[in-house]
Amino acid sequence: MKILFYGAKDYDQQFFDKLKPEYPNIEFVFIESNLYKETASLAAGNDGICAFVNADLSAGVIEELHHQRIRLILMRCAGYNNVDLAKAKECGISVLRVPGYSPEAVAEHAMALVLTANRHTHKAYIKCRENNFSLNGLMGINLYGKTAGIVGTGKIGLAMARICQGFGMKVLAYDPFPNEKTGLIYVSLGQLFSSSDLISLHCPLTPETHHIVNRESISHMKDRVILVNTSRGGLICTEDLIAGIRDHKFFAVGLDVYEEESDFVYEDMSEYILKTSTVQRLLSFPNVALTSHQGFFTEEALTNIAETTLENAEAFRTDMELKNAVSL
Ligand code: NAI
């Protein structure tokens, strides 16, 4: 079975190559180009494709893949909001994903963003390098004793809840499907927003959660709240967030994901004049820390991603149960 691996980086190939000897009947062809309308035809001659969070898997692209006789889409990630599942079903294409490859990787990065944005370590590092040892502008707040609100208590949300408890925080949670076994205090989303000193988003992006953080919900948040998003950019209405930051609503904001990211995520754009401006506006605020969708990026997570993606491919190849299939 031949799989075309779109958007391949050296680190992807390194972890897949390690497992190659265990799967002699599966051949991966790695290409740097990402998947979008213009590159979908490159899939010709393969049985499946492998794609990531920043690939375009909208209806038109899936139709083209179908035209190229693709039968399998292997998402090497947990989220699949970029896949038109209805079109995949209509075309008889199976979509498999990696449901949980390292919740701790993402949760630990979420806490790294909290600490960075709160204690301004990204600024302190640069200041010290310039022999500027003053503390002006670097004051943070203690997390100990404060309240953390976790939106979405799946694998990553629970890992973040554990980390917050480790910091001595009281943890509130919201999830339409509360998991009572966790012992967390579940409250309504409104209550969570109005009672939390730190809000961390860990729910999937769906029509229901799109812009869950907006002008209205921001107005109910505590003044000087810390907001962190490592889930999906579309959960936050960026314009409303910027307005809230300008109104001094937020003590600190940490974003690993943002609405404009798909245009340049994982690319070195340092020599380009970007056509979009939201990221630049966010970066202009002293209490905002941004990273480029790297929550997943640990050795453990990349090992798990490669293992599960290959298991998914092998299950498809041998007509076994597709336990990681996603459908409508
Ligand atoms: P999960 O499926 O284990 O948990 C998601 C939780 O969100 C579930 O408990 C679900 O009931 C809950 N949920 C659904 N609708 C909700 C709503 N309207 N409000 C609040 N909660 C809701 O998913 P997991 O593995 O914890 O991942 C969470 C998200 O993290 C993914 O959807 C993905 O977008 C993002 N992610 C980000 C990564 C990064 O590198 N920054 C890497 C991996 C995932």
Image (cartoon, grey):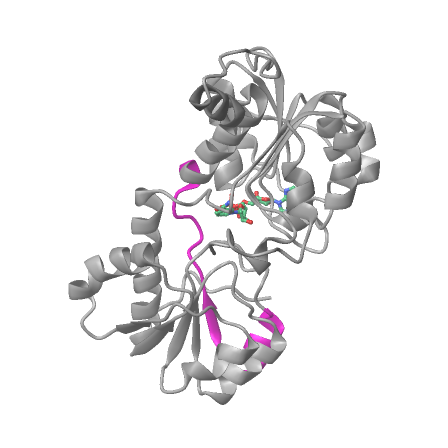
Q: Nearer the viewer, residue 164 or 177?
A: 164
Outermost left residue? 21
Q: How many marks?
A: 0
Quadrant assignment for the N terminus: bottom left
Residue 282, relative to residue 48: is it above or below?
above
Q: Residue at x 66, y 21 (%)?
A: 197
Q: Residue at x 46, y 22 (%)?
A: 130
Percent from the top left, x then y, of residue 162? 47, 26
Q: Is residue 90 magenta?
A: yes
Q: Is residue 227 left or right of residue 241?
A: left
* Whether residue 203 can be seen here: yes
Chain part drawn in magenta: 84-104
Percent from the top left, x then y, of residue 253? 63, 31
Q: Nearer the viewer, residue 290 or 82?
A: 290
Q: Is residue 171 left or right of residue 302?
A: right
Percent from the top left, x then y, of residue 241? 74, 38
Q: Is residue 293 magenta?
A: no
Task: Please state the quadrant of the image where ligand 1 appears.
Answer: top right
Percent from the top left, x then y, of residue 33? 43, 70
Q: Nearer the viewer, residue 243 or 181?
A: 243
